[in-house]
Image (spheres, rainbow, N blue to C red):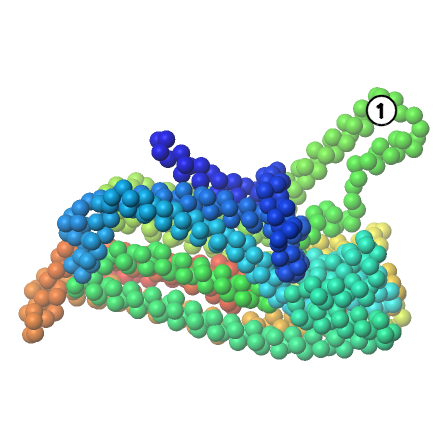
Amino acid sequence: MIVYLPLVAAVVACLALAAPQVSTRADLAVTRVSLSFFGKYVAEHGRRQRERDLMRAAHVGGTHREYASRTLLYAGVLGVAGSVIGVYLAGGVLTALDVGEQTFAEALPGTLSFLSALARLAEVSLLELFVLLLVASATVGSALAVGAYYARWGLLSQRATTRAAEIDATLPRTVAFVYALSRSGMAFPRVMDTLAENEAVYGEAATELSVAVRDMNAFGTDVLTALQHTARRTPSEDLSEFAENLASVLGTGQSLSTFLADQYERYQEEAKGKQRQYLELLSTFAEAYVTTLVAGPLFFITILVVIGLVLEDTLPLLRVVVYLGVPLATFGFVVYVDSITQGIGGTERIERGSDADRSTGVTRTDGGAVAAIERGGDVSDRAGDRWEASRERLDAYDRFGALREWAASPLERVLETPQSVFAVAVPIAVVGILVAVHPVTWGAPTAVAAQIDTAIVAGIAFVLTAYAVVYEVRKRQIRRIEAAIPDFLDRLASVNEAGTSVVASLRRVADSDLEALTADVRRLRRDMEWGADATTALRRLEGRVSSPMTSRAVVLVTNAMHASGDVAPVLRIAADEARATWTLRRERRQEMLTYLIVIYISFLVFLGVIAALSVSFIPAIEEATAAGTPTDVGGGFGGLAGGLGGIDTFAYEQLFFHAAAIQALCSGIVAGQLGEGSVADGAKHAAVLLVVTLAAFTVIASL
């Protein structure tokens, strides 16, 4: 076993590089080691300006010296580990080839017999062996070292590109926010502070501008210089242009509201154009998927099946195509589409605080009780112990807060986190599979697979269906609420324009019919009747709805209320922004419906061809073989089919079922991503296609 110690050490070194992803202490240790080895070199010879600009564009924390030193450490460790692994790989190849050229030639098909010459590699001299191991070590080590170095910097470039797309996508709503608060009378520095406080709501564009806010607040940088720095740092050309123009307007004293109004209208128009380009891009992806990953594998499988049944067994190659080729190609396609469309039309996500914080707007401080005691004068040790015990009980109460919320309203919690349904659906599916396949008769792999594959596919369909139901219920609920938000804001603006205060306007609007939003708005009115101020009531509304569009509207309205009682212009802007966002989403769903149908039809064609091969082609070949059909030319069809007796036709039929199930899962995922912008949306499509596959093969089995 001692001969494998270097290999174990190399693998452990590689795993140590991944430890910082899960441990803060490991991350600090790796940073210290990298700085001690390479920190001085990076400081003296690093291409600091270009790499610093790349880090800023990617919004990466830490210093350039730290990141560059870690990059060199990763490259060095992987280079050394790769050299060791390369030696063992070369040794493994030589061991595998040590079977003799004649034996190797007999094991290979006739068309590949020339590969038997590779067996001669096992018969090398000591010097040749040294050179071979040296070349293998240098090749693998260099590849890993160079790959790690350029991958680390390439990752920053990719992240910067992704951020640029996200900034461009969120810039219109960010400009609308700045414009609306400026119209409300709020000073521009305060507008920027408010934007930075709500960067989680307004996305990557607000995050980029918040860096300028931190420059002004932490380092005393003036607003013009901070905006100019943002223009140079940001990876987005649109934001760079906006920041430069905004700095020019502020520097020359022009009307800020007029400039922001022009920019707001411009970005709204550009959003429509980008939506059209985005839909065209998605349509191209849909056509490419159908052509290459549905029709392509179907054609390849058909050809291999024909060759396998009439000439020579092709099951090994078919299994590679079905079990590896199609899933890996689909995974690569999904990742590529996600990287291209990141931030353009994907699902919005907002990181918020706990539900308790959202609903009350109050943050509990453990030091409150202590401060109250100290204000009262001297406190005995016994009183201090009592308050300490109280704090411990409060901490214990907070630790079980999530569990109490689940126990109080389990259905609501499941709807808020659809992935939690897996905790119940997966065990049920596993138990159902075990019950359905028990007892399993062990034998050939195809025989064992035949006993369990249908149950496994049914279990996967059950899990996906459970998740899709919960996900779709929540999604449609939010969609109905968001459809009512523009109308709610317009009515609130109309009442406020008539001279009614914001609180009275909210109470008046609560009496109207707002469709899916009616119940939440009336609850908002009850909150105010029971003593909550308008800001707290709106924050609670935001917490209950948990919608990105609602969050943006609430943040805008609540901050405008602090600046002025006349919030009607702000409400109009918020309503226009919400309506524009809703319209773009609706157009996307309508446009992509055609390509969803195309994906479904292409899968049904795939299933139909597979069924034809199972029902017609294979039985025809078997009958021809059994009857010994005469041939016209060179043995003809009967001569070709004469070798069918040694081919496992049942394995081919079983492989057809697996291919259809895998294609159903892959097509469903792609349909969800292309049609609705998220892989999670593909759960319902995958579940439907899996059920169709099960039904089709049940009918085939009964024929």
Residue at the limit of the structure toward the front, as seen here: 127
Q: Position of residue 35 (x, y in %)?
A: 62, 43
- The quarter of the rendered structure image containing the C terminus is bottom left
**Residue at 56%, 73% in the rendered image:** 278
Is 640 situated left or right of 519 in this image? left
**Residue at 68%, 37% in the rendered image:** 399
- The quarter of the rendered structure image containing the N terminus is top left
Is 453 situated left or right of 518 in this image? left
Crowding near the residue tagged with mark 1, few <14, some 14–19, many ≥20 C-alpha atoms within 10 Å? few
Residue at the limit of the structure toward the right, as seen here: 377
**Residue at 48%, 43% in the rendered image:** 14
Q: Secondary structure at mark 1?
A: helix
**Among the 4 quarters of the image, the one containing residue 323:** bottom left
Measured along the vertical axis of the image, is residue 437 above or below residue 318? Answer: above
Choose between 151 and 198: the one closer to the eye.
151
Choose between 49 and 566: the one closer to the eye.
49
